[in-house]
Amino acid sequence: MLSSVQLIKIDHSSEGQKLISFLKQKTKIPYSGLMRLLRTGQIRVNGKRCSAFYKLKVEDKIRIPPFKIDPNQSYYNKALPFQLISLCKIKETKQTLSKNVIPIIYEDNEILLISKPSGLAVHKGSKTLFSLMDIISVKYQDNTFIPTPVHRLDKQTSGLLLLAKTFSKLRLLQQNWSNITKKYLVKVQGKWPYNREKKITHYLYKPKKGIIQNNPQKGKKSVCIIKPIIITEKQSFLEVSLLTGRTRQIRAQLALEGYPIIGDNKFACFPKKTPLYLHAFYLSIKGKQFIDWPQWAHNHLKTLQCL
């Protein structure tokens, strides 16, 4: 089954974006397939051959040739070089968003703020067939620029995820990310020993084999601020603010301190079905504050709302 020829006119939302990035968003054709279509001149901009790294301008017209769609497959499959999400999956993902499985916290012409559930990867990977971006790309399939995540959020981490709805806004937010305030709520194993705000520092190093270690000689400086919220003998609720942005930093630092996040099977031993109690609950942007409490903290809302 072949798609029809697509003719797309670029508007301000995609201005400055590289052609190859735009095509990956709009078509779901694998990178190698797109490069082949560009090399052979089947994809054209304003009627001419174009570099994959050409930066789009307003009023540019892109021609995308027909490509294969498998109507029987739900997800992208590497064995099929030209494949989109099937029509039945498009219908299903629209219903998923309409049922608030992925709640939209805030939206305007420039940004989209959602509450990502735990267990859903933001992007596809070698072991991930379906991702949040599959849902987003279907919901906003009529947009010239598909809303794109401004920052990372691990698959098992839940909470606020900010997406930009224009390429210029994406660049601006990423360049000024250090000025955006973001806070996490975690539930850790054990009685947290500090009753005041505490800055902790490690030098995180990931060896070729094994988990992240604290290594002052080889590691990258990693700093976060931890504020105790509720402390009991067996468990503690903590608010965490990052001063650096290392991969899995919160999980690694708390585990190194001896207080692993409950449900963290990478840095501690918990039953496999235990969810990770790590949630991005607070984000401040454009003079507005957004708060999203996780379901597992609802019994403590009175205390949390005093933060």
Image (cartoon, rainbow, N blue to C red):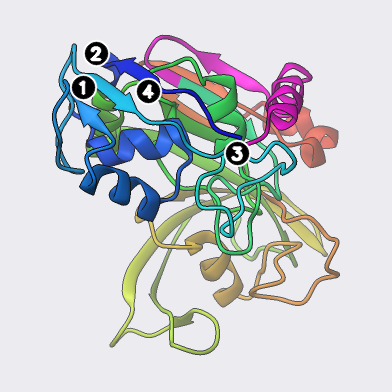
Which amino acid, by three-letter code, is at mark 1?
Glu
Residue drawn at (33%, 17%) of the image: 8
Considering the numbered disc 3 on the image, is that residue within a helix, a strand or a loop?
A: helix
Residue density around tag 2, few if under 14, some if 14–19, many if 20 or more, within 10 Å: some
Which label was assigned to residue 15?
A: 1
Q: Disc 4 to disc 1, how far (Cα)? A: 9 Å
Question: Relative to 12, is 295 on the left or the right?
Answer: right
Q: Position of residue 136 (x, y in %)?
A: 56, 29
Query: Is residue 142 placed above or below 306 in the rendered structure?
Result: above
What mark, if any, has residue 12 been given in the picture? 2
In the rendered structure, the answer to whether residue 110 lies left or right of residue 92 reads left
Tell me the element at label 4: loop
Q: Earlier in the sequence, mark 3 or mark 1?
A: 1
Q: Mark 4 or mark 2, which is nearer the start of the sequence?
A: 2
Q: Looking at this view, is 130 or 103 the one in front?
A: 130
Q: Which residue is mark 4?
A: 145
| Camera-side mark, 4 or 3 | 4
From the top left corner, tell me how far across and down residue 62 is, in percent: 27, 23
Report if the CB atoms under discs 4 and 1 are less than 8 Å apart. no
Residue 241 makes an appearance in the image? yes
